[in-house]
Amino acid sequence: MAFLDLVSELTGTLPGLSPILAQTYINRALQKIYGERLWSFLVTDGVIVCPASVTAGTVAITQYVADVTLDATASAAILAQTVVGATPGILNLQIRFGGPSPAAGPVYSILAFDATNPAAIVLTLSQPVSEATDATAAYQIYRCYVIPPMDDFLRWESVVDPSNTITMTGQRLTRTSREFDLMDPQRSSQGLAYYLGAWGGNRVADPVTGLTSPNATVDAGTPIYELWPHPTTGQTFFCRIRRRGEALVQPTDTAPTVISDAMILQAALYAYAYPFAMANLANFPQFKNANWPVLIAAAKNEYRTELLDAKRADNETQLQDVWNLGHGLRTRTPFGRAGELGYPIDANFLQSHLIRF
C-alpha cells in the first residue's frame, strides 16, 4: 500500500486526526518495526574509493591559518578531484604536511576549495595549520577518513578489498581511532589499510555558515571512520552494511514487502494515534466514551501477531534467527580448532557433539 493510502486509512480509522500528524505516526511506526530485528532487506552493499596519495609539487602554508595554496604542479595533480561528480571528490580527502613521505604532521580534512585559478588552488582546512610557515612545504593528500555509503547506515558487516585480498570483519571493524593513537600516534603506517575504526561524529565547524567538519559533504552527527594503516597506494573497498531503514516520503512510496500494511497501521494506532486521541478527547468528541486502554491493547496484540508473521516470512527469505558468532553456543573456534566457522545450534547438534563452553 502506498504512503498516501496508509495515511488515508489511519485518518479514516481515527476521524479528526491531522493528515500531517498521520504521516509522522506512519513513519514512526515504520522505524519502530525496523528496530524490531535485523531484517534481511536492510542489508545492502556500497563502495568506498580511496585514491592513491598525491605528493607532486609543494604547498604554501602559514602557521595558524587554515587556508593553504597549492603550487602549479600540486594544483594540476589534484585538479581532477575538484570537478563536480569526481570520486571521491576533494572534500572527502585529507592533507598532511612535512616530508619526505610519509608526512608526520597532523591530519587535516579539506572543507572547501577555490579553483578559480587552476594553477593555484586554495584549500580551506578543518583547523588552522600548526606547522611553521613554509612557502614550499611537502605534503600528502589522500583519504583516511570515510563515511558510510548510505544515509541510514547502522553498522558494517564486512569491508573487502578484493584487489589486495584484504577482508575486514569482526575485530577489524570494531577498533577506534583512540587505539590507532596508541599504536601509531604519527600515523606513519601507510600503504594498504586493513582496519576500520570509529573516529567520531561529524560536527558543525562554523555555526554561521553551517559548515561541517571533518567532512563538509554530510550533516552533523554523521559517523566518521578512520582506515588504518592510512591507504596511500589506492584501494577500492566493497562493503556490506546494515541499514536503519528509510522513511516514506513520496505519496507513492511503499514499505518493504515483508512488512504488512496492517502491521504498520496497528503499530501507529497503539503506539501513537490512540494515545494522542486519549490525551486530546476535546478534539475527538465522538470517541469520548471509547475504552482507550482496551483499544490500545487490541491494536498492540494485532501488531505482535503481524510481527511474528513478518519475522517468519523474513526467515524464509534469508534466515536471520541464528545466534551470533561468539555467543558461546556458536563460535569461530568450535571444538578448539581456530579458524573454522561456528555452527548454528539445534537440539540434535547439541546431543550429538561434544561442545566446549
Image: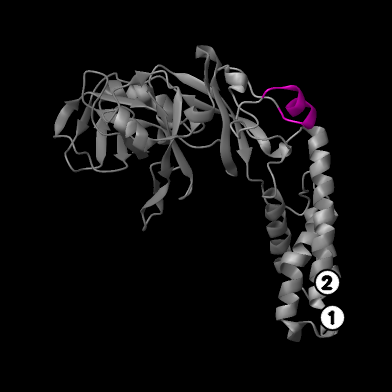
In which image quadrant can residue 162 be found? top right
**What number is the disc on residue 295?**
2
**What number is the disc on residue 290?**
1
* Category of crowding for the residue at label 1, using alpha-carbon neighbours closer than 10 angstroms: few (below 14), some (14–19), many (at least 20): few
The residue depicted at 83 percent of the width and 71 percent of the height is: 295
Identify the amino acid type marked 1: Ala
Labelled pair 2, 1 in contact (Cβ < 8 Å): yes
The residue depicted at 19 percent of the width and 26 percent of the height is: 137
Q: Position of residue 278 (x, y in %)?
A: 74, 78
Foreground: 181 or 57?
181
Residue 232 inside the magenta-drawn segment: no
Q: Is residue 179 above or below residue 299?
A: above
The residue depicted at 49 percent of the width and 37 percent of the height is: 147
Q: CA distance from mark 2 to mark 1?
A: 8 Å
Tell me how many marks there are: 2
Q: Position of residue 283 (x, y in %)?
A: 75, 83
* Category of crowding for the residue at label 2, using alpha-carbon neighbours closer than 10 angstroms: few (below 14), some (14–19), many (at least 20): some
Name the residue at the top extreme.
Answer: 164
Foreground: 83 or 68?
68
Left/right of residue 203 with respect to residue 42 in the rendered view: left
Foreground: 345 or 232?
345
- Magenta extent: 344-354
Left/right of residue 275 with respect to residue 154 in the rendered view: right
Which badge, 2 or 1, comes first in the chain's sequence?
A: 1
Residue 8 in sight in this render: no
Residue 83 in sight in this render: yes
Element marked by disc 2? helix
